[in-house]
Structures are given as structure tokens and as C-alpha cells.
Image: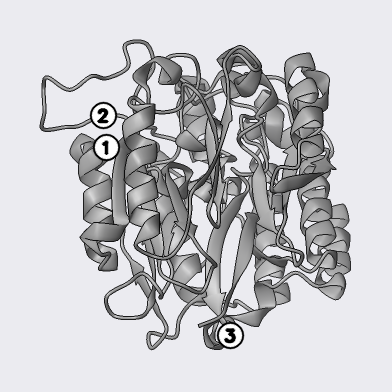
């Protein structure tokens, strides 16, 4: 059965800000409390979506989440009117206020894990919203993510959207950022690779020492069960704990896959040889040969990979059978990475094109091209059954640009989060957005 991959990019919200809340994410932490530009961030993201849609790639969006999260603020004891809640939080705990205003839902790679219908036992496309319970500022996201996914993929004949796993450390789940699907083509059965950082129920298992391992083996196994995945075509591979301690907080910061290609760093996995052997054997079972593209430490040190987000790129199949690598401008600014990519494209690799985007607003907050998108392989029937209002078209692009220009600020300081007018502006903007996308009631 034929299928087409759509990338659902997160539309950056009106309160995009740099709070530096994500310990373990070096870029996020290094830009804490600097001024952001929400308008520019949204326009940069929209430009990327428009360009890829124009190239013929399947492109859609997930709407931003409402901010601030008043439910979070009230649940920890801030009372009164909305304005009073904001004032009290700003005075007593600016960090909690920043958590309530977190911009992180823009990174939809963390919204859910997705298994195409070709892989599932019941022949439906499955989503499990990620609980993101490692960080306070993200732990409430799954409620709105589930709501949005069910609004877009509401036909239960074709789609199953599961609630997030229990919000306990044992089931720490960060979504598609630690999940890669490899296959012969998007419509055929594939191999689903879950990369985990630690094992909750094995005290002797290795784990990082400096930064938290956010994805557990137990969560990965639970998602696979919910999606009805075949044991023979499901791999559980441990991330190298040493690279987590170097700022590789998700697997998509050190590896990216598409079709039968796995583009990865030498230090990505705890057992590189074992991981590749498992993948080769599993892919052989679905008629595919693994194309492993290894980047050696001697060519690109881990620190350079993290600084440039080389692997937090999109790997897209082109009509000619080759692949394009979607990269941020930062890849051209880190000498080792720029040199490596030049050689890669000239080498005759399946990756024969680089597509550059300016995503500096997202990059400074700790997310690159791959963070911004959730990959969903859809058959023709599934593509027709999903809500069409979120599919990127030239008309939608221009409508959203005008909406951003109307509602977004071009500068946001940390102190602005205490301004009750900002909350009103965000809510007003999102109510209009729900009408634009044809999703009334999305923010009720």
C-alpha cells in the first residue's frame, strides 16, 4: 500500500520566550532569560513549512498550546483572578510562572510517538501522547497534545490516539524524539526503533551521571504494546549515557533516520555494533537493507554536533530516490560540520542535497528542524480522512503570516510574563487561529 510522509510542524506561539527551563539542553540553558522575538520565530517556522510544501513534501502543522497554563498555576496554590494569579506567581516564584509560559510545545517531535497503519496489529495509525514528565514545564503538555491530535485525526476507523502513559519516573516518555522508523518505503511494514536512556527496574543498568535520561525502556515497551507492534520488528536500543552527559538530551540530537537510511554519530548508542546488527536483521525481514551513514568523532566531535544540531535535521525522501537533509544555518557556522556535509554530498551518498533554513529563534531555545516536526506516514485514505485545515498550502501560509503580523510581539522580555495583557493577547490570537484552522473549540 502506498503512503506519503507528512511532517507536522509546531506553529510557534505568541508567547515564545527563553526561560532556560530544560536542564540537560545546552542551547536552552545558555540563552536563559534573554529577550526573544515571537513574531520572527513564528515567521521562520512558517517559511520552512511553506518551502517544503512547495517542494512537494507532505507538510502540515500542529497549533500552539494556550499560554499561560493557568491550570498549573492554580494547582500549586496561586489564587484569585487571572491577573492576580500572574502577579502572585511573578512575585513568589518567577520560575513557576516561566513554566506556565513555556514555549516548548512548538517542538512537536515530543508531542507523541507515531506508528503507521502498516506496522500496527489493527491496521490503524496510532499515536501515544508523550507524558514529558521529566520537566515541570512540559508535564502538562500531553493534555492539549491529545486534544489537538484527536481533533485532527478523529476518524476512529483510521486513527487511534492514546492517552499519555502514567506520569511516573518509570514511564518517562519524550515521544518521537527517541523513536525512529526504518523501512523500504513509507507504505510497507517497517522496523520501529525506540532509543531509551535508562531502565527503571534494573538498578545495575548504566545511566548518565550529569544530566537526566528522559526516556525509559519501560515507556518504550508500553508504547509498542499500545500500538500493537510486532516483536520481530520492534527494537529497543540504549542511548550512550556518555553523550547524554554531553548535552544529547534526546536521540534526535545524535541520530536521524528515514526509509532505510540511518544517519548517526559514532557515539550515539551504548552498543553501536549490536544496534546495527539488530537493525540489519530486522530490516531484512521487511525486504530492506540498512544504509548506515556513520559520522566519526574524529570528523565531528559530539560538542560540534550539539552546537550545530547536525543530527537534529530532517531527512526527506525525494522523487528521484535520493534524500535531502534539512539543516539549520548553524551547520554552516561550525567548521567541522560544514566540512563534513560538503564531503557527504559530494561522496555519492543517498543524501545528495542540503536544504538550509534560518531557525535561529528555535535554535536558541534548544530545538532544531527535527524538534519542530512530528512525522506521520499516511495512506491516501488516511490523508483524506484527517482534518484538512492544518495542511500547509500557499493560501494558508499567507493567512497565517497576516495572523502573526497582527497578534505577535517582536520582543518579549522575562519580565513581560507578569503582564496580564500578554495572556489576553495570546488567548485572543489562539481563538482566531482555531477559526482559521477550522478547529472550533480547540482551546475551550
- Relative to 263, 45 lies left or right: right
- Relative to 307, 44 lies left or right: right
Q: Which residue is mark 2?
A: 198
Query: Residue 224 has which mark?
Result: none
The span from disc 1 to disc 2 (Cα, nearest Å) is: 5 Å
Q: Residue at x 69, y 60 (%)?
A: 428
Asked if the residue under mark 2 is in contact with the one under mark 1, i.e. CB atoms within 8 Å, the reply is yes
Q: Which residue is mark 3?
A: 380
The span from disc 3 to disc 1 (Cα, nearest Å) is: 34 Å
Of the pair 189 and 195, the residue shown nearer to us: 189
Of the pair 327 and 182, the residue shown nearer to us: 182
Q: Residue at x 49, y 24 (%)?
A: 248
Q: Which residue is mark 1?
A: 216
Number of the front mark, 3 or 1 = 3
**Sequence-first disc among 1 and 2:** 2
**Sequence-first disc among 2 and 3:** 2
Of the pair 433 and 226, the residue shown nearer to us: 226
The span from disc 2 to disc 3 (Cα, nearest Å) is: 38 Å
Q: Residue at x 19, y 38 (%)?
A: 170
Q: Return the x and y of residue 291 as percentages of the image width and height.
A: 54, 46
How many neighbours does mark 1 have within 10 angstroms: few (below 14), some (14-19), or many (20 or more)?
many
Asked if the residue under mark 3 is in contact with the one under mark 2, i.e. CB atoms within 8 Å, the reply is no
How many neighbours does mark 2 have within 10 angstroms: few (below 14), some (14-19), or many (20 or more)?
many
Whether residue 324 is visible to the viewer of this picture, yes or no, is yes
Q: Is residue 331 above or below residue 85?
A: above
Mark 1 secondary-structure assignment: loop
- Quarter of the rendering containing residue 60: bottom right
**Sequence-first disc among 3 and 1:** 1
Amino acid at each position: 500500500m502506498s503512503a506519503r510522509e507528512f511532517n507536522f510542524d509546531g506553529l510557534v506561539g505568541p508567547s515564545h520566550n527563553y526561560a532556560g527551563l530544560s536542564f540537560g539542553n545546552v542551547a536552552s540553558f545558555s540563552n536563559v532569560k534573554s529577550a526573544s522575538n515571537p513574531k520572527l520565530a513564528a515567521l521562520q517556522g512558517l517559511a520552512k513549512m511553506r518551502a517544503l510544501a512547495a517542494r512537494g513534501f507532505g507538510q502540515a502543522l500542529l497549533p500552539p498550546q494556550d499560554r499561560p497554563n493557568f491550570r498549573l498555576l492554580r494547582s500549586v496554590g496561586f489564587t484569585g483572578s487571572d491577573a492576580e494569579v500572574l502577579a502572585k506567581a511573578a512575585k513568589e516564584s518567577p520560575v513557576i510562572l516561566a513554566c506556565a509560559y513555556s514555549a516548548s510545545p512548538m517542538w512537536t517531535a515530543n508531542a507523541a510517538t507515531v506508528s503507521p497503519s502498516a506496522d500496527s496489529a489493527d491496521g490503524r495509525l496510532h499515536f501515544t501522547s508523550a507524558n514529558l514528565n521529566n520537566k515541570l514545564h512540559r508535564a502538562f503538555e500531553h493534555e492539549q497534545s491529545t486534544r489537538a491530535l484527536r481533533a485532527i485525526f478523529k476518524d476512529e476507523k483510521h486513527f487511534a490516539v492514546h492517552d499519555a502513559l502514567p506520569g511516573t519516573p518509570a514511564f518517562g516518555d519524550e515521544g518521537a524524539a527517541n523513536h525512529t522508523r526504518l523501512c523500504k518505503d513509507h507504505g510497507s511494514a517497517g522496523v520501529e526503533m525506540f532509543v531509551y536512556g535508562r531502565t527503571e527496574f534494573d538498578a545495575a543498568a548504566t545511566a548518565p551521571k550529569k544530566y537526566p535520561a528522559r526516556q525509559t525502556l519501560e515507556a518504550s515497551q508500553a508504547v509498542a504494546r499500545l500500538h500493537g507492534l510486532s516483536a520481530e520488528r520492534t527494537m529497543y536500543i540504549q542511548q550512550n549515557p556518555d553523550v547524554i552527559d554531553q548535552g544529547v538530551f534526546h536521540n534526535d540530537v545524535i541520530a536521524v533516520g528515514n526509509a532505510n537510511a540511518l544517519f548517526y554519530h559514532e557515539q550515539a548508542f551504548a552498543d553501536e555494533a549490536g544496534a546495527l546488527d539488530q537493525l540489519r536483521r530486522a530490516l531484512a525481514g521487511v525486504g530492506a537493507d540498512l544504509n548506515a551513514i556513520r559520522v566519526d568523532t574524529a570528523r565531528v566531535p559530539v560538542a560540534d554536533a550539539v552546537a550545530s544540531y547536525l543530527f537534529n535535521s530532517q531527512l526527506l525522501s525525494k522523487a528521484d530516490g535520493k534524500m535531502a537533509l534539512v539543516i539549520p544555518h548553524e551547520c554552516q557556522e561550525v567548521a567541522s560540520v560544514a566540512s563534513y556535509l560538503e564531503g557527504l554530498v559530494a561522496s555519492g551518498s543517498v543524501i545528495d542535497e542540503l536544504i538550509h533554513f534560518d531557525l535561529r529563534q528555535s535554535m536558541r531555545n534548544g530545538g532544531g528542524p527535527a524538534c519542530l516536526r512530528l512525522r506521520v506516514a499516511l495512506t491516501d485514505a488516511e490523508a483524506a480522512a484527517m482534518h484538512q485545515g492544518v495542511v500547509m498550502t500557499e493560501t494558508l501560509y499567507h493567512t497565517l503570516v497576516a495572523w502573526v503580523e497582527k497578534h505577535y510581539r517582536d520582543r518579549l522580555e522575562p519580565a513581560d510574563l507578569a503582564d496580564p495583557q500578554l495572556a489576553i493577547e495570546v488567548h485572543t490570537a489562539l481563538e482566531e487561529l482555531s477559526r482559521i484552522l477550522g478547529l472550533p473549540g480547540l482551546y475551550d
